[in-house]
Amino acid sequence: MKFGVVTFPGSNCDQDMIYVLESLMGQHVERLWHKDRDIKGCDFIVVPGGFSYGDYLRSGAIARFSPIMEEVVAHANRGGYVFGVCNGFQILCESKLLPGTLQHNISQQFICENVYLKTESTNSILTRAIEKGEVLKIPIAHGEGNYFGPSDLIKSLNDSDQVLFRYCDVNGNINAESNSNGSLENIAGICNVGRNVFGMMPHPERAADPELGNVDGRKMFESILSEVIV
């Protein structure tokens, strides 16, 4: 599989993502610049975290108009895989590739800490090799990670098995105490109806190298590359 990682002015997790995909997972990775109009034949596009264009207006609101995002949207509409992490999730929501929006954290503060995620669905390339209900420890680092949508949207996400991860405690209990940003129903990651576009606020690329003492995030990359038939 050929991966493409997008870099915007203000991206700060693009090199982390490239390192994991290229050095740890042994994959071919193309560097995609925000002004590019060619995704260079990539099968799987990653929109990484950071502060694209300084996060002026709303997070991701300017990045959605960049030339590369026109190509990413076209790729997704053809059924190609797209994965947005943190600011990338915000950009995918602004681009309408994923439903809902990310608001300011309920605390109105930037949060950087390890959190626990409960795997809610295995029906995606991102989670197909992870057991349903499995708890993963993954770091977050964001100021606008509070997932929000109207009640009918949340119902649709639940009914269609589009919620991939929810914030939980170490034992897998989903409660308010484990939901530091205030996301509706503890939602931490979702996919689209077509199950080819994924977004999550936590950073799996920051929990993939043994040198960091946590490899729970590596399971998502192994899942993407697995041969499991969904």
Image (spheres, rainbow, N blue to C red):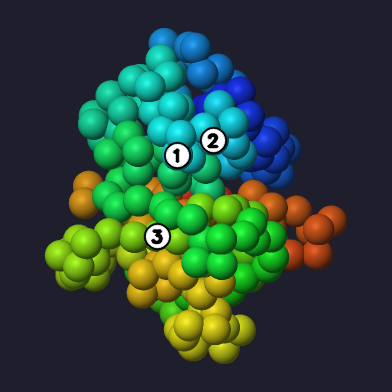
Q: State which quadrant residue 60 falls in.
A: top left
The image quadrant where one finds the C terminus is bottom left
Picture residue at 36% right of the left edge, 70% below the top: 184
**Amino acid bearing label 3:** Tyr
Depth check, front residue: 88 or 52: 52
**Amino acid bearing label 1:** Arg
Secondary structure category for the residue under label 1: loop
Residue 206 place in picture, x, y as percent: 69, 53
Which is closer to the viewer, label 3 or label 2? 2
Horizontal side of 79 relative to 227 (left or right) equals: left
Picture residue at 54% right of the left edge, 84% below the top: 177
Please tell me which of labels 3 and 2 falls first in the chain.
2
Residue 203 place in picture, x, y as percent: 60, 53
Q: Are marks 3 and 2 in contact (CB under 8 Å)?
A: no
Depth check, front residue: 216 or 145: 145
Gap in angstroms between the C-alphas marked 3 and 2: 17 Å
> Callout 2: few (<14), some (14-19), or many (20+) C-alpha neighbours within 10 Å?
some
Horizontal side of 59 relative to 111 (left or right) equals: left
Q: Are marks 2 and 1 in contact (CB under 8 Å)?
A: yes
**Amino acid bearing label 2:** Asp
Query: Farthest residue in the right direction?
Result: 211
Residue 120 place in picture, x, y as percent: 38, 72
Gap in angstroms between the C-alphas marked 1 and 3: 14 Å
Please tell me which of labels 1 and 3 falls first in the chain.
1
The relative height of residue 223 versus residue 12 in the rendered view (above or below) is below
The disc at residue 55 is 2
User: Which residue is denoted by mark 3 in the rendering?
Assistant: 147
User: Which residue is denoted by mark 1 in the rendering?
Assistant: 58
The relative height of residue 186 versus residue 7 in the rendered view (above or below) is below
Picture residue at 51% right of the left edge, 75% below the top: 179
